[in-house]
Image (tube, coloured by chain):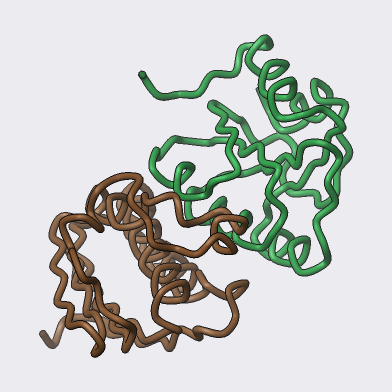
Amino acid sequence: MVVKDIIDILEGEIICEGDLNQEIKTACGSDMMSDVLAFVKDQSVLLTGLVNPQVVRTAEMMDMACIVFVRGKDPDDSIVNLAEIRGITLIKTKYRMFTACGRLYANGLSGGTKI
Amino acid sequence: MSNALHLHYEVSGEDFTRAGEASGAVKKRLKSLGYDSDAIRRVAIAMYEAEINMVIHAEGGFCDVDIYPDRVEILLADKGPGIPDVDKAMTEGFSTAPDNVRSLGFGAGMGLPNIKKYSDEMRIETTIGVGTNLYLTINVKK
């Protein structure tokens, strides 16, 4: 799956465009950034309902290519600027967290970690 | 010591949105020096969590980073309130962060456990009312 597929599956809207052909192997859905940071995964997408600059910084530390804001939340300019500089794609989807994760999972994306 | 690349950063305690700038800068520098991406990620995450802690609990401080060919040594020093019970602070899920920090996505009690997990060596020197020095060593390779 690539970033572009995620946009299709979540009927998402691009807020900040990075590499849309970047491959995505795993996903992580959380509003707690420390929980995201607890599991290093490769080439991941972050789904979150949290809207602040630390979401982008967390993605940066984790080498994540894409952040999805659920429930149609709009990040402000400071967040978009941070993502732009780092080449991270920002997407918003109208789906809620559970549904957004479920749609990606149903299309073959996994959490990437064993229980 | 002479073969280390030394970096110094001040961490502002006033602006939560800027927390992570030092970690991001170190990450970028390690990348340009050609270190292995897994190792870089471990350095970045450990340092980022520590930086967040400094902002949440200690009104900022400074980071000294020494980059060697085989390891990165980081000192994060603050003049905060100190950690009364380090063992308790190391427990996953234990947090003394205020509620407003939780609404920012931190304060889940994972900071120090995460730092320990990603570091090869971790040492805390803390004195109540004086501050905390956190020493980290993370082995890296190119």
- In the displayed structure image, the side of residue B140 where residue B61 appears, left or right: right
Tell which of A45 and B57 is nearer to you.
B57
Residue at 36% x, 67% y: name it. Answer: B50
Residue B133 in the figure: left or right of residue B27: left
Quarter of the picture holding the N terminus of chain A: top right
Q: Colour of chain A?
A: green
The C terminus of chain A lies in quadrant = top left
Residue A59 horizontal/vertical position (percent): 56, 50
Foreground of the two, A25 or B56: B56
Image location of residue A113, percent across then percent down: 40, 24
Q: Is residue A95 above or below residue B94?
A: above
Q: Quick one: which chain is brown? A: B
Q: Is residue A57 above or below residue A7?
A: below
Left or right: A84 as drawn, with respect to B1: right
| A55 lies above or below A12 | below
What x and y, as percent, mark residue A91?
79, 42
User: Residue B92, located in which quarter of the rendered image?
Assistant: top left
- Quadrant of res A100: top right
Q: Quadrant of residue A13?
A: top right
Q: Residue at image x 43%, y 35%?
A: A41
Seen at 82% across and 62% down, the residue is A76
**Image position of A16 (left or right of A31):** right
Give whichever of A73, B137 is nearer the camera. A73
A8, above or below B130, in the image: above
Residue B1 placed where, x, y %? 10, 85
Number of marks present in the image shown: 0
